[in-house]
Image (cartoon, rainbow, N blue to C red):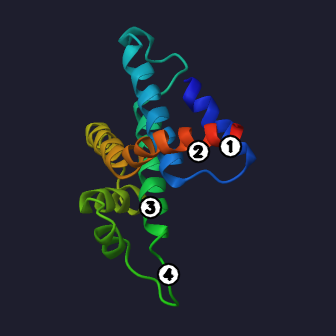
């Protein structure tokens, strides 16, 4: 949760990279889901996240993730399809299809959205976080040099 508070502070100051924002959104969805699952069935009528609200949080995280990733490839005078840009960027096509379903049709099942969240976080790790982690040693050396 400390990481989520940091991202929230970053958001309040301006633009946050899509991958950071998406990661935080998926983590928030997973926390809401875990809180909903931890609540005993006898307390289901008490305030707290419902199945539908958790599905909406996951669906919004997925929609913003796909749109954010694809927006970077939307260049030129004519709009290109989300599917074609997603394919170029290595985004699994089923993410795009699930985003379309959540946006324009029925809200996907909680099981499907959980799976999408898990795979999206793996995609973000491989496509963004691993590269960020690899740059840390060089950034550390540069920071030390600047401080001398």
* Mark 2 secondary-structure assignment: helix
> Which percent across, then down, holds residue 70?
43, 67
**Separation of marks 4 and 2 at Cα, in angstroms:** 34 Å
Q: Who is closer to the viewer here, 123 or 131?
A: 131
* Residue at the disc numbered 3: 69
10 Å crowding of disc 3: few (<14), some (14-19), many (20+): some
Q: Earlier in the sequence, mark 4 or mark 2?
A: 4
Q: Is disc 3 in contact with disc 2, using a CB cutoff of under 8 Å?
A: no
The quadrant of the rendering that contains the N terminus is top right
Residue depicted at x 31% and y 72%:
88
Q: Earlier in the sequence, mark 1 or mark 3?
A: 3
Residue depicted at x 58% and y 44%:
142
Label disc, if present, on residue 142 of the rendered structure: 2
83 sits left or right of 26 in the view: left
In the current view of this chain or complex, which residue is farthest to the front?
148
* Mark 1 secondary-structure assignment: helix
Whether residue 44 is visible, yes or no, is yes
10 Å crowding of disc 2: few (<14), some (14-19), many (20+): few
* Residue at the disc numbered 1: 146
Q: Who is closer to the viewer here, 76 or 95?
A: 76
10 Å crowding of disc 1: few (<14), some (14-19), many (20+): few
Q: Who is closer to the viewer here, 39 or 120?
A: 120
Q: Is residue 75 placed above or below 53 in the rendered structure?
A: below
């Amino acid at each position: 949760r400390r990481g989520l508070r940091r991202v929230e502070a970053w958001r309040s100051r301006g633009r946050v990279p899509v991958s950071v924002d998406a990661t935080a959104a998926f983590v928030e969805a997973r926390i809401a889901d875990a809180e909903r699952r931890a609540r005993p069935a006898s307390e289901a009528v008490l305030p707290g996240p419902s199945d539908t609200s958790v599905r909406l949080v996951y669906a919004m995280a997925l929609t913003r993730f796909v749109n954010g990733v694809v927006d970077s490839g939307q260049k030129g005078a004519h709009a290109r399809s989300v599917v074609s840009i997603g394919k170029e960027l290595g985004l699994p096509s089923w993410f795009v299809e699930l985003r379309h379903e959540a946006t324009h049709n029925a809200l996907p099942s909680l099981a499907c959205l959980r799976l999408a969240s898990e795979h999206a976080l793996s995609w973000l790790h491989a496509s963004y976080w691993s590269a960020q982690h690899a740059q840390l040693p060089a950034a550390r050396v540069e920071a030390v040099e600047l401080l001398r």
